[in-house]
Image (spheres, helix red, strand yellow):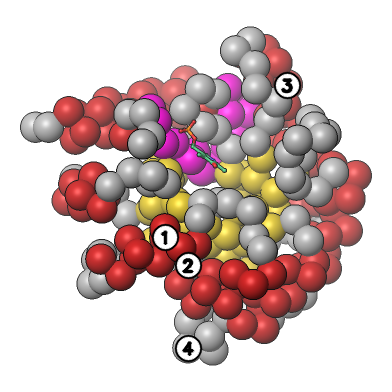
């Protein structure tokens, strides 16, 4: 086994172990392949991984072309510019970084009719940091309600990138506020089933708070180019 396949196996084991400790289902692993090679994606695919995430449309389109024919589920996790919505709507299965209604409406209008609705998470700026995108926690419920009625989009839940800290208690605090916010919004939108949270350095805390999708890059592939 190569080191990438080995790391993939170890990471899956760790995710399962954390989920068991938490008496919860194992979260889905989204392999964040931004700035990683097509060969690395192929190798994880051969090992059974199907969900891959990219944060730049141009880079993603190149990889999608080279990987045509593989049953990859593509997740978009980067900032969404208006002039990129058509490419995203036609080539991705999920977006995790939706934070404006105008963009949601474009994605919904541009989603090709022959494809299933685009799965979407609303990105929440959970620690209200000036440097981060995402809707504020206060504005989140209203945006969810607006997006939830758009044909062409299937609203699935919330996503966050919390404040960077190595303190597990602070990590947990941010993720728990996300879980509380999701529970509050579920009272009006019970169909929401996804909490996209947890990256290489904080996925244990995210799982303890009930994450259903972890987005992991460097801890899986190694450092990015
Ligand atoms: C890059 C990125 C990740 C993965 O980050 P790692 O620390 O490498 O695991 C997850 N989510 C988003 C939105 C990202 O941009």
Q: What is the CA distance from the residue labelled 4 to the residue labelled 1?
A: 21 Å
Identify the element where label 3 is drawn.
Answer: helix
Instruction: Tell me: 91 left or right of 221.
Output: right
Question: Who comes first in sequence, dot 2 or dot 1?
Answer: 1
Tag 2 and tag 1, C-beta contact below 8 Å? yes
Which residue is tagged 2? 92
User: Farthest bottom residue?
Assistant: 113
Which residue is tagged 3? 173
Which residue is tagged 1? 60
Q: Which residue is at a point 23% across and 72% down the rendered structure image? A: 69
- Queried on whether the Cβ of the residue with tag 3 lies below 8 angstroms from ligand 1, the answer reads no
- Residue neighbourhood size for the residue with mark 4, other residues' Cα within 10 Å, grouped as few (<14), some (14–19), many (≥20): few
Q: What is the CA distance from the residue labelled 3 to the residue labelled 1?
A: 33 Å
Q: Which residue is at a point 31% across and 34% down the rendered structure image? A: 221
Question: Who comes first in sequence, dot 4 or dot 1?
Answer: 1
Q: Quadrant of residue 81?
A: bottom right
**Magenta extent:** 204-219
Q: Which residue is at a point 64% across and 60% down the rendered structure image? A: 80
Which quadrant, please, contains the C terminus? top left
Which residue is tagged 4? 114
Observer-nearest of 215 and 23: 215
Q: What is the CA distance from the residue labelled 3 to the residue labelled 2?
A: 31 Å
Identify the element where label 4 is drawn.
Answer: loop
Q: Quadrant of residue 205?
A: top right
């Amino acid at each position: 086994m190569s080191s990438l396949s080995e790391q993939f196996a170890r990471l899956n084991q760790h995710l399962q172990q954390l989920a068991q400790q938490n008496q919860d289902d194992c979260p889905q692993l989204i392999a964040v392949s931004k700035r990683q090679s097509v060969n690395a994606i192929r190798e994880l695919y051969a090992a059974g991984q199907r969900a891959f995430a990219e944060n730049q449309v141009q880079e993603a389109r190149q990889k999608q072309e080279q990987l045509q024919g593989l049953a990859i589920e593509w997740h978009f996790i980067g900032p969404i510019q208006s002039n990129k919505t058509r490419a995203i709507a036609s080539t991705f299965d999920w977006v995790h970084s939706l934070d404006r209604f105008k963009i949601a409406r474009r994605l919904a209008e541009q989603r090709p009719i022959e494809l299933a609705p685009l799965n979407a998470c609303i990105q929440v700026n959970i620690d209200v940091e000036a440097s981060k995108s995402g809707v504020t926690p206060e504005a989140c419920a209203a945006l969810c309600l607006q997006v939830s009625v758009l044909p062409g989009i299937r609203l699935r839940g919330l996503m966050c990138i919390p404040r960077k800290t190595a303190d597990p208690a602070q990590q947990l605090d941010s993720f728990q506020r996300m879980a509380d916010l999701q529970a509050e919004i579920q009272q009006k939108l019970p169909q929401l089933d996804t909490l996209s949270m947890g990256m290489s350095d904080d996925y244990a805390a995210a799982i303890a708070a009930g994450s259903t999708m972890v987005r992991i890059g460097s801890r899986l592939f190694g450092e990015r180019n």
